[in-house]
Image: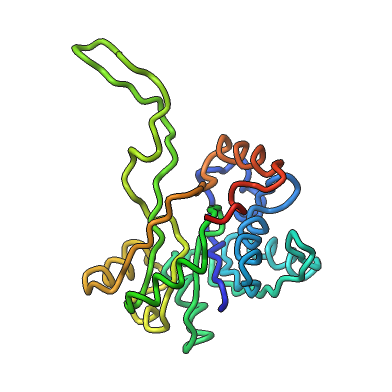
Amino acid sequence: MKVIIIAGGLGTRIAEETEDKPKPMVLINSKPIIWHLMNIFCLQGLNEFIISTGYKSEVIENWVQNNQILDSNSNKMTISTINTGLHTQTGGRISEVMKTLPQEKMIATYGDGLANISIKRLLDFHAMHGKLATVTAVRPPARFGYMKIDNNVVTHFGEKNQSDEGWINGGFFVLEPKVVNYVEFVNEPFETGALVRLAHESNLMAYHHQGFWQPMDTLREKKDLEKEALSTTPAWLKIN
């Protein structure tokens, strides 16, 4: 099964790092975050990737063309790129890749988020429900100081527990070939277009991932990932 990695956005929320490269090429301890992401799949037997590019597409294309890209176990990855346009939104980036392989079920995910997700469990869940699409539901990382207040007196101050947060879209989609028909325009977000239509028809199911998940939207999150990457086995490779 092939994996689509969405890697064409402007990355404006971490503009300090993305002036000269797309966000998936931001380095986490000498390796682009997209390399760390692909290792999650390679560890579980999936090593064929199609990168959907746009902003600064040449940076990713050069990286793929000019490097023998190996996973953490020194196995060669199979990587291709498709330039889906500068202003194309996530829906178009996914659908343009799916159109090149119209009969294939695919996994798709964002190029800037890591998780220790079990791909086998995800695929088993998808096969069990028989719907057109599965989205991985995750708990958002706690980002703000949490206060418990009683009569204006702060009785507790600290980090909010991640399990107290609601469920959000964490990427790691499984998509049947017909999903391409739910993307009406290349300039519409997948999240507010195709996923909404699929949900309206009860064709979208959520796989609940309880383990590690971390996007890279801020410099603080980048530094957190860099620290974790120094571990013998980073959290995103401890498959849950």
Answer left or right for 73 relative to 21.
Answer: right
Q: Quadrant of residue 227?
A: top right
**Eyeballing the image, is 85 above or below 220?**
below
Is residue 184 visible from the viewing direction of this image? no
Question: Quarter-wise, where is residue 185 in the image?
Answer: bottom left
Q: How many marks overall?
A: 0
Q: Is residue 50 left or right of residue 142?
A: right
**Residue that appears at 76% across and 62% down:** 73
- Is 182 in front, or is 39? 39
Q: Residue furthest bottom?
A: 103
Q: Is residue 175 left or right of residue 218?
A: left
| Image position, residue 195 (x, y; %) | 32, 67
Split into 4 quadrants, where in the image is the N terminus?
bottom right
Q: Is residue 149 above or below residue 59?
A: above
At a point 33% along the width and 21% down the height, the residue shown is 147
Q: Is residue 43 above or below residue 47?
A: above
The residue drawn where x is 54% and y is 54% is 116
Q: Residue at 56% x, 72% y: name it.
A: 3
Residue 34, percent from left and from top: 63, 58
Q: Position of residue 157 (x, y in %)?
A: 37, 18
- What's the image's color scheme? rainbow
Q: Is residue 139 visible?
A: yes
Q: Name the residue nearer the viewer: 211 or 185.
A: 211
| Residue 224 pos. (x, y %) | 60, 37
Q: Give the image quarter of residue 132.
A: bottom left
Name above or below for residue 45 compared with residue 32: below
